[in-house]
Amino acid sequence: MRAVIQDRYGTADVVRLGDLPRPEPAAGEVVVRVHAASLNGSDRENLTGSPFYARLAGLRRPRRPVPGSDMAGVVTAVGQDVTDLTVGDEVYGELSGYRGALAEYVATPPTLLAHKPAGLSFTEAAAIPQAGCIAWRAVHGKVRPGDTVLVNGAGGAGGAFVVGLARHAGAEVTAVDRTDKADHLRRLGADHTIGFETEDWARHRERYDLIVDLVARRSPYRVHRALRPGGTYLLVGGRTRTLLATLAAGPAIRWLTGKRVRVLAVPQSRDDLIAVTHLVTTGAVVPAIDRVYPLGEAPAAYERLAAGANRGKIVVEVAAGHTGRPTRPPRAGSAP
Ligand SMILES: NC(=O)c1ccc[n+]([C@@H]2O[C@H](COP(=O)([O-])OP(=O)(O)OC[C@H]3O[C@@H](n4cnc5c(N)ncnc54)[C@H](OP(=O)(O)O)[C@@H]3O)[C@@H](O)[C@H]2O)c1
């Protein structure tokens, strides 16, 4: 089968197309013919092996050569003891270990996969899993109408979904990313935008009920000052040392200020995936799709991801199998 292969960590040129044996399902696994896979910030980290937690996939080189965590496709084989999926089912979801999606076939336990809603294309479904589930955990049950929410790293995969969900929950949303993404952030539904190169949101005093930080680099002792009394700061991704400092300082900050400053662990969850997808199928949130590439152009997709040139999700159409220029997305991302 054709697959994207990454033998080592590095820049986008470590990714190449190759051939691998087609997988057979072990007991408790299904094999999915992948139709579409999408790229997240975690794929960029898994490419470079940085931050350090990306090396959980292999200290010196990735243990599993095929990258990609999010995919949508059709079940082609079912292993022993699998009862909830059958051959021909259209499914989508995140893969355990965040790898394996960028190949024509992948063997995976079915526990994280959900039935693809008929109203979504494989391309649209593949764009949801990791980013959608981050946003679901960051926003669901935490935002009330009228709350002020700041999203740091709002122009990326998870941030775009967070902006959409927070707006849907009735919040006033401030989106932070590169200055040249301001138009994109407004199309996502942001009320206010901040270019991180020119303005430091952490200097805003007591302004936000919720801060969702996808690219954390600031001390936990700084970020809490931007929270209103009783507010919450959630670190989703960022530098390892900031993550460790936030884990360590969170309880003391809570005790001293009453504010929550913590790391948000986002479990891979079929239930969360179904819940956030419901918001997509009802039109409450629209996944922001940047570009769609055929599998033959996957190295170019990685170049775009590594350069940070994307505005929303990059999707690779694996089953289409044709080569040629990257195609435009079926629709641009925007939230009501
Ligand atoms: N907590 C969990 O359980 C969990 C689960 C899954 C993933 N994650 C993590 O979540 C993080 C975010 O994922 P993602 O897919 O949303 O990443 P992403 O698509 O790379 O988005 C990050 C965005 O932040 C922008 N950015 C870069 N530097 C910035 C700065 N200093 N200030 C503000 N914005 C900045 C990036 O712009 P450029 O692209 O132009 O640089 C990009 O638009 C990753 O670190 C991932 O590992 C965490």
Image (cartoon, rainbow, N blue to C red):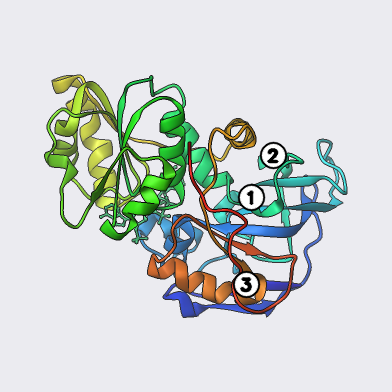
The quarter of the picture where residue 23 lies is bottom right
| Drawn side of residue 119 relative to residue 41, left or right | right
Residue at 37 percent across and 42 percent down: it is 236
| Drawn side of residue 23 relative to residue 177, left or right | right
- Give the SS element for disc 1: helix
Residue at 38 percent across and 20 percent down: it is 145
Distance of label 1 from label 2 (alpha carbons) = 21 Å
Vertical position of residue 103 compared to residue 286: above or below: below
Which residue lies under the disc numbered 1?
124
Query: What amino acid is labelled 2 in the image?
Result: Thr
Give how far across and how far down residue 296 sits, in percent. 65, 76
Q: In the rendered view of the protein, which quadrant contains the N terminus?
A: bottom right
| Drawn side of residue 10 relative to residue 332, left or right | left
Disc 3 or disc 1, which is closer to the eye?
1
Give how far across and how far down residue 228 sits, in percent. 20, 24
| Drawn side of residue 200 relative to residue 177, left or right | left
Marking on residue 4:
3
The quarter of the picture where residue 63 lies is bottom right
Vertical position of residue 42 compared to residue 150: above or below: below
Q: Are marks 1 and 2 in contact (CB under 8 Å)?
A: no
Give how far across and how far down residue 283 sits, in percent. 59, 35
Residue at 62 percent across and 56 percent down: it is 330
Choose the circle earlier in sequence order: 3 or 1: 3
Closer to us: 314 or 189: 189
Q: Are marks 2 and 3 in contact (CB under 8 Å)?
A: no
- Give the SS element for disc 2: helix
Choose the circle earlier in sequence order: 2 or 3: 3
- Give the SS element for disc 3: strand
Query: What amino acid is labelled 3 in the image?
Result: Val
Closer to us: 288 or 79: 288
Which residue lies under the disc numbered 2?
111
The quarter of the picture where residue 83 lies is top right
